[in-house]
Image: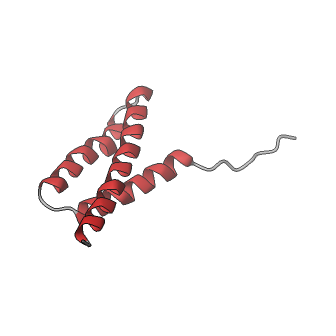
Amino acid sequence: MKVMFFQLPYAEIGTGIALILVIWGIYDSEGKARLIILALALPLFLLPLFVSSAVPRLICFVGRLLLGIGCYIYIKYQNSVGSL
């Protein structure tokens, strides 16, 4: 008898958190920063839908995580500078 264990989808959780941070960064930013975030986010989130190879998917996954981290840093920086 084979026992199946539940495995957490860590990649999807990371992508979801990155998407939330990107949306929050777009909402918080204005002007050029909003365009830069959108220009980086659109290819990273849409390219895996059209490409079936593993290497571009991995590059987009890492890019989405880095973009999410960048948006988090941007949000924290904007809030700390705005409160001075």
Q: How is the image coloured?
A: secondary structure
Q: Residue furthest left?
A: 31
Q: Residue furthest right?
A: 1
x, y (%) of residue 4? 76, 45
Q: Is residue 63 left or right of residue 2?
A: left
x, y (%) of residue 27? 25, 65
x, y (%) of residue 32? 12, 53
Q: Which quarter of the figure is the C terminus placed in?
A: bottom left
x, y (%) of residue 67? 33, 47
Vertically, is 55 above or below 46?
Answer: above
Vertically, is 27 above or below 5?
Answer: below
Q: Quadrant of residue 78?
A: bottom left
Q: Which quarter of the figure is the N terminus placed in?
A: top right
- The residue positioned 74% from the left and 47% from the top of the image is 5
- The residue positioned 31% from the left and 63% from the top of the image is 24
State the residue in front, 21 or 2. Answer: 21
Q: Residue furthest front?
A: 84
Q: Quadrant of residue 83?
A: bottom left
